Image: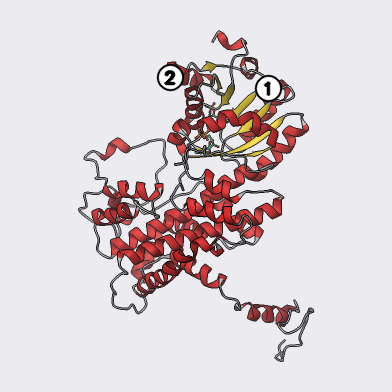
Amino acid sequence: MTNKQTAIADIAVLGMAVMGKNLALNMADHGFRTAIYNRTASKAHEAAAENPEQNLIVCETLEELIASLKTPRRLFLMVKSGPPVDTLIADLLPLLEPGDLIMDGGNSFFKDSQRRSEEVAAAGFRFLGVGVSGGESGARFGPAIMPGGDKTAYELAAPVLEAIAAKAPDGAACCAWMGEGGAGHYVKMVHNGIEYADMELIAELYYILHTGGLDNEAIAAIFEEWNQGELSSYLSEITVRILREEDPADPSIDLDSSLKEDPIALELRSSGAPTGSKYLLDKVLDISRQKGTGKWTNEEGLELGVDLSILTAGLNARYMSMDKGLRVRAEAELPQGALTEASSLPDKASLAQAFLAARLLAYAQGFSLYRAAAKAYHWNLDYRTIAATFRGGCIIRSALLSPIMEAYAADSDLPNLLLAPAFRATLEAGIPALRSLLASTIATGLPVPAYAAALSYYDQLRAARSSANMISAQRDYFGAHTFQRTDREGIYHHEWPQTDEE
Ligand code: NBP
């Protein structure tokens, strides 16, 4: 390129794989002159050549890229998370000037962003760890953006990030500063954990209805109806489209040789699958994978002592799904247990109430993790803003986010989302519906781990007196771990009766 030595670019995007390329095009669409760089320069040239209208400035070296940018410089990294981000930052630091800003928009672990934030600041520059949600089309036409790090740095980034972000139904940009250090990537990580739960609740409902004899069209019609009101969500919307999609005549069109196939025998693959169906979903193998952010969320729940059982059910269901061979063998060999005669499922209205309550319970768990993280990492997280940011562009965008925003607007320090008066009616209708859904599915042997976790969480949460007195007494018995008493203050140990062996 010839125009690269003049400092005319408003922003640079580094990394021209699917996400970086689409973000760069999005920035250019919004009037920002965008310089692009990729380790393998040919990909940057291809991106520019394929999109001449966006007038992208291709830079083959980091020096050219730096020279092309107006100061203070805005550099947006969209490369593979992990060591590549550190390598690129290390290569950039010697080229920067005070005030320059590095943003990492990849799926980085929040503790890496925390560390990078400190390292870049120590070198005299600014850093933002930016959670980006919405996949390829989000990147191109409006993702949800969750930046964290130096607040003054956000002021420099905001005009670009807020312009390219998705817009919520009220027109607000789905982008806001989340907090210091790794807060942005933390918010994005928990978003993905909630996504696992939301997806699992839909999948279980589909499984219940399918096993109950409804065909794909009938199930799609139910989700479609629900999508008109308080249950409407992007995930339910795509569920309708997935349910209705017919198997293409020539399946080879979808073959992608770059993906490694699971080594699973054909007879195992078809086990339990409907035969002769015209729908593609019925031919999709019942194995689901994960890339790690859902696992990180659950690890954080364990680390900070927050019950994420519904989110964990979503993760565990994927692990269990991957053991297809074991499941096929276990179905043939293990006793089913005495099952009740299949009772009829709760009616559609009751299922909707159970679905809404379970989703709310999953969000309550995710937002409880935010609350614990705010305390542990000294972030001033604004839960209303987090919910507002999820309303567009991201995978968990849904109608449920509006009442969540209202709940936190009314009480920004709500100890648990479920305590919001705004959700009283949802719980009053939804909890009995959840009980009847579980009564019928458990009696007939249908696995519904996310719904079961949701109800258990609720029942534990509202048990003023739990079973933990027994645990505490047992710990004191075998380990002299002491206990507190209900009737007086102080720490006690008791000489519990021992057997001769003890
Ligand atoms: P990938 O995650 O597949 O990364 C490929 C890019 O990283 C290429 O541009 C590659 O350059 C570059 N790269 C690598 Br690999 N090592 C590098 C190094 N040492 N120095 C400089 N560049 C290096 O790309 P992606 O799917 O576009 O995702 C980018 C980030 O966005 C990831 O963190 C991802 O997790 C995150 N994300 C992805 C999605 C999605 O839907 N795909 C959604 C949200 C977030 P090369 O061409 O020279 O190999």
- At x 72%, y 32%, the residue is 120
On the image, which quarter does residue 487 sit in? bottom right
Q: Nearer the viewer, residue 35 or 397?
A: 397
The mark total stands at 2
Task: Say what amino acid the circle numbered 1 marks.
Answer: Pro
- At x 22%, y 55%, the residue is 275
User: Is residue 253 among what the camera can see?
Assistant: yes
User: Is residue 292 among what the camera can see?
Assistant: no
Task: Say what amino acid the circle numbered 2 marks.
Answer: Asn
Image quadrant holding the C terminus, namely: bottom right
Sequence-wise, which precedes: disc 2 or disc 1?
Answer: 2
Q: Assign a secondary structure to mark 2.
A: loop
Image spot of residue 228 (x, y percent): 34, 51
On the image, which quarter does residue 432 sit in? bottom left
Q: Nearer the viewer, residue 456 or 445?
A: 456
Q: Nearer the viewer, residue 472 or 129?
A: 129
- Which label number is shown at residue 51? 2
Image spot of residue 235 (x, y percent): 40, 49
Residue 272, above or below 342: above
Give the residue at the far front of this rendering: 410
Q: Assign a secondary structure to mark 1.
A: loop
Image quadrant holding the N terminus, namely: top right
Tell me: is circle 2 under 8 Å from ligand 1.
Answer: no
- Which label number is shown at residue 200? none
Q: What residue sits right under mark 1 in the picture?
A: 72
Quick one: label 1, few (<14), some, or many (20+) residues within 10 Å?
some
Give the residue at the far top of this rendering: 2
Nearer to us: label 2 or label 1:
1
Residue 31, above or below 495: above
